[in-house]
Amino acid sequence: MEVIKKKRKKRHLKRWVKIVLIIILVLLIVLVSYLVINKFKDSDEKVKKDENKKEVTITKEKESNTLSMVMVGDCLIHRFVYTDAKNSDGTYSFSKMFTEVESLIKNHDLAFYNQESIIGGKALGLSAYPRFNSPEEIGQDMVNLGFNLVSLANNHTMDKGEEGVINSVNFWKTYPGVYYSGQALSKEDRESNIKVLEKNGIKYAFLAYTSVTNGLLPPSGKEYLTNIYSKEKAQADIDKVKDEADLIIVSMHWGEEYTTYPNESQKKIAKELSDMGVNLIIGNHAHSIQPVEMIGDTLVFYALGNFIAAQDTPDRQTGVVVTLNINKDDDGKITFSNIKASLIYTYFKGSGNFKVYPYTNLDNSLLNNYQSYYNKYKSVLTRYTDIIEVE
């Protein structure tokens, strides 16, 4: 009987041992499963993080190969304009004239305008038509507005002679963040200003020329004072930068005043510059808006009209603010996107109260029948192409 009890006890113990072993095995399986699942989960999350990180990096790379740009036309400071800007202490303030368009211009990588009336220094006497000389404050206020690409080549460059050009160049040299072109102090100074800068992964060069001079030429041997266009000169300048620059921008002062279409000379020069590898041509001088055109891969604005002036017809009071993106692809090719035009209007009453308005802020009290003018200038801009959106 005692033997039977011992055998039963032994079988019972074995059963419990089996149960415990099974429980331990199950727990081990659960533990291993948990660890494996979490390992895969962590790995998956790491892959997702890496993918997200990669996407962010790619996005940043794409963003770093894009420049935002804004451009406007002629800054022509007539007597009425600088008189309206004069303060009681003898200084000048033009910034109040631009408050309505400030938001269109600020915060771009590149911002272009044509300083048509030379900043020749007050010591030479301020003056207006036919030979201009503007106060330094207009340059200061335009820089404060955000402009950093400035054309100095135009038919008023020599209005105050060699001394005026020297004063102008020395003024612009005080703004190292501004890339100007079109005037120089010497041959060496001109050469040193043909340069390549880089922003957002895009290397760019800027050149400015004029084909009109009002018969005012620099002295013999001092042709560097004003950059008068010739095909040979432009080709030589472009050859100096084309191997390094991704983007070449040329400002051209050309054509006929007060016309809304380019002449044959403008078209010929545009084709020459396009053949030389120029990507973007910004034209001015007409004091009126002219069309936009693509010549091959070259984007051409024949004229952007006045940014500010005291000329009193709608054609001459209407200009345009153009914004666009400049893109460089993986092969280094430059393309343009998001090209938009905002029509602007220089309002003044009598000889004062100058203010530049976007057409979107106009009403009939500022410009009677302004909507018909909007339609007219939209039609002018889009005469050759619909790549530009007129707002």
Image: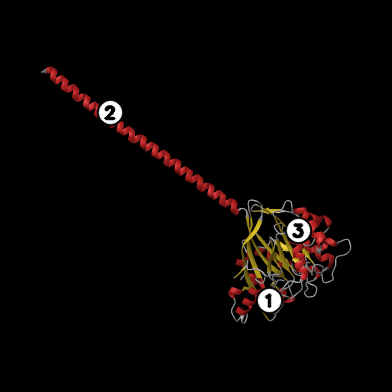
Please state, as top left, top right, bottom left or bottom right, where the N terminus lies in the image. Answer: top left
Indicate whether 57 appears above or below 375.
above
Residue appearing at x 24%, y 26% in the figure: 17
Mark 3 residue element: helix
**Disc nearest the viewer among 3 and 2:** 3
Res. 91 visible in picture: no
Q: Position of residue 318 (x, y in %)?
A: 67, 75
Label 1 vs label 3: CA separation? 34 Å
Considering only vertical position in the picture, is 147 above or below 246?
below
The residue type indicated by label 3 comes to Met
Name, please, the residue furthest toward the left.
Answer: 1
Mark 1 or 2: in front is 2
Q: Write down the quadrant of residue 15 in the picture.
A: top left
**Image coordinates for residue 136, horizontal then vertical, percent:** 74, 66
User: For mark 2, does the 10 Å Cα neighbourhood hold few (<14), some (14 to 19), or many (20 or more) residues?
Assistant: few
Q: How is the image coloured?
A: secondary structure
- Amino acid type of the residue that numbered disc 1 sits on in the rendered structure: Gln
Mark identifier at residue 385: none
Q: Earlier in the sequence, mark 1 or mark 2?
A: 2
The residue that disc 1 covers is 317
Q: Position of residue 172 (x, y in %)?
A: 74, 61
Q: Which residue is mark 3?
A: 276
Q: Position of residue 79 (x, y in %)?
A: 74, 75
Quarter of the image with the C terminus in it: bottom right
Q: Provide the residue designation for mark 2.
A: 21
